[in-house]
């Protein structure tokens, strides 16, 4: 192999390792962000989705008396 081919191969391997390191760092950060031990205990957590107690307000309207 020529010196030019070795230099090109080294550059390719270096770029691959840099990209791999960046992807692993982003993945580790995302895993840390969603880990259960990372959330503060601030009270009940609300989750989006279907609930069986909708609507929450069950007030009934009282009809107004007729005006003569």
Image (cartoon, rainbow, N blue to C red):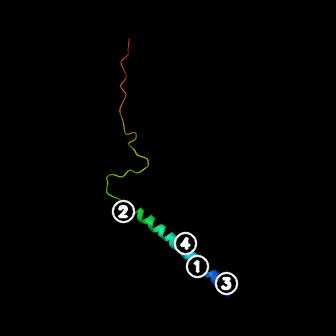
Query: Disc 3 to disc 1, how far (Cα)?
Result: 14 Å
Q: Which mark is residue 19?
A: 4
Query: Disc 1 to disc 4, how far (Cα)?
Result: 10 Å
Which of marks 2 and 3 precedes in the sequence?
3
Q: Nearer the viewer, mark 4 or mark 3?
A: 3
Q: Which type of secondary structure does the marked residue at label 4 adopt? A: helix
Q: Residue at x 60, y 81 (%)?
A: 10
Which of marks 4 and 1 precedes in the sequence?
1
Q: Which type of secondary structure does the marked residue at label 1 adopt? A: helix
Which of marks 3 and 4 precedes in the sequence?
3
Using a 10 Å C-alpha cutoff, classify the residue at mark 1 as few (fewer than 14 neighbours), some (14 to 19) or many (20 or more).
few
Q: Nearer the viewer, mark 1 or mark 2?
A: 1
Query: Which image quarter is the N terminus in?
Result: bottom right
Q: Is residue 27 above or below residue 52?
A: below
Q: Nearer the viewer, mark 2 or mark 4?
A: 4
Q: Residue at x 47, y 67 (%)?
A: 27
Which of marks 2 and 1 precedes in the sequence?
1
Give the residue pinned by disc 3: 4
Q: Which type of secondary structure does the marked residue at label 2 adopt? A: helix
């Amino acid at each position: 192999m020529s010196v030019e081919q070795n230099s090109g191969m080294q550059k390719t391997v270096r770029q691959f390792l840099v990209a791999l390191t960046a992807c692993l760092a982003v993945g580790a950060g995302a895993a840390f962000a969603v880990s259960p031990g990372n959330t503060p205990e601030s009270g009940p957590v609300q989750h989006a989705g279907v609930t069986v107690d909708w609507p929450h307000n069950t007030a009934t309207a009282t009809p107004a008396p007729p005006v003569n």
